[in-house]
Amino acid sequence: MGQTITQKILAAHCGKDYVEPGELINARLDFMLANDITAPIAIREFERIGAKTVFDKDRIALVPDHSTPNKDINTAQLVKTIREFAKKHNITYWFEIGRVGIEHTLLPDEGLVLPGDCVIGADSHTCTYGAVGAFSTGVGSTDLAAAMALGETWFKVPEQMKFVYYGKLPKWVGGKDLILYTIGLIGVDGALYRTMEFTGEAVAELDMAGRFTMCNMAIEAGGKNGIIAPDEKTLEYVKLRAKRSYTIYTSDPDAVYREVVEIDVSKLEPMVSFPHLPENAKPVSEAAEICIDQVVIGSCTNGRIEDLRIAAELLKGRKVHPDVRLIVIPATQEIYLQAVKEGLLEIFVEAGGIVSPPTCGPCLGGHMGVLAEGERAVATTNRNFVGRMGHTKSEVYLAGPAVAAASAILGRIASPEELK
């Protein structure tokens, strides 16, 4: 019987030729990560169990990205805890201010997560790395603590779902729109503890930025992991960055899926997810006349250079609406510098926006754009739960960079087509 790409990766990492959905396995890990919120808990548990050293100092990344630069005394203390642990264990991939970026953009760009890898992270959006053909998933801090000591962890092999996207992508429709539409179709628990394997001609048409976005939000449908089989675009991206060898896996033609979902993208509009769940996805044409107070363009979902280029294309020569605050957050220092070189940051500032250092910041209601009571934001982030970006009576509408930029200009949720 054939296997999917996910089954093959898990089988290879537990020393088997074949694994069944529902099977419990112990898997060797290629890489693991934690951030400034989750790492201190993992460090405490690592020390509580009496571990003396990490399993491999080159296979762990500690990324203080959620409140960067430190926003208050508490966050400074948390980062200090991580810094001291990293120095004590000589952790190679400790990313301090000036070198740090949003973890799920930074690590693949640094060549630290690669095709065929088995990766865990103490952050739910670790599923992002499926875009390079890796099995990656989020875990709790205590699981990470054990993994830092042992170099392995346990999994229940997930059931497999395949999503086939066919047809030509309309202008302004990208990976964010595909995944919002998909979550709207199946619901926030529609892929609960399942693999979401994305395939089809429309996915092949996406650049790597769009693929990272899709895999990033698999968790928003309850997925255990999102994954896309590597192709020439993947290899072009990986070959420039890889710091070690990697293995390419693809799904067998006779692989068994719990469900196959086919989606014609040719008539899709840019999508908007209404409060307070990502599944509340609607075409942008159904979201008119909703006035907003803030727009955030960035995060691990849409903070790549390709996203910033889309936003800048629409903002160039225009002004942000006087009632709107525009915050742009490049996801890494490298992306920030590239945006400087391309003149994108000048466009954002001249339009009336501000540019933040790389940080998760407002995505989790941390800093750099927290909402007050009654305020509404359009954000290219990945969650819009109650109170996610600030006050429990604020609202977050999820969208891609094109809708976000158009909305910043018009002062309400808007389609980029309205700016002709």
Image: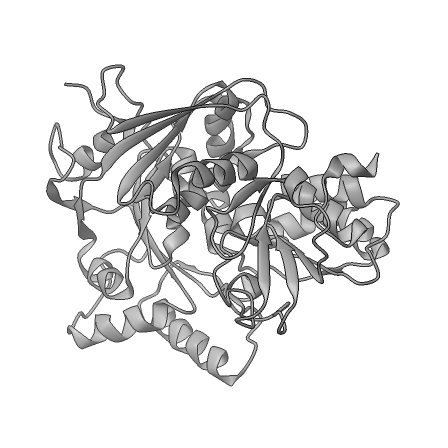
Residue 264 in picture, x, y percent from top left: 50, 21
Residue 300 in picture, x, y percent from top left: 52, 51
Toward the viewer: 105 or 236?
A: 105
Q: On the rendered image, what quadrant is the N terminus found in?
A: top left
Work out whether 33 lies above or below 371: above
> In which quarter of the view is residue 258 placed?
top left
Work out whether 308 lies above or below 115: below
Residue furthest bottom as drawn: 73
Residue 404 in picture, x, y percent from top left: 68, 48
Toward the viewer: 56 or 137?
A: 137
Residue 124 in picture, x, y percent from top left: 37, 55
64 left or right of 396? left
Q: Residue at x 77, y 39 (%)?
A: 313
Q: Residue at x 56, y 73 (%)?
A: 391
Q: Residue at x 46, y 50 (%)?
A: 104
67 left or right of 130? right
Q: Is residue 133 visible?
A: yes
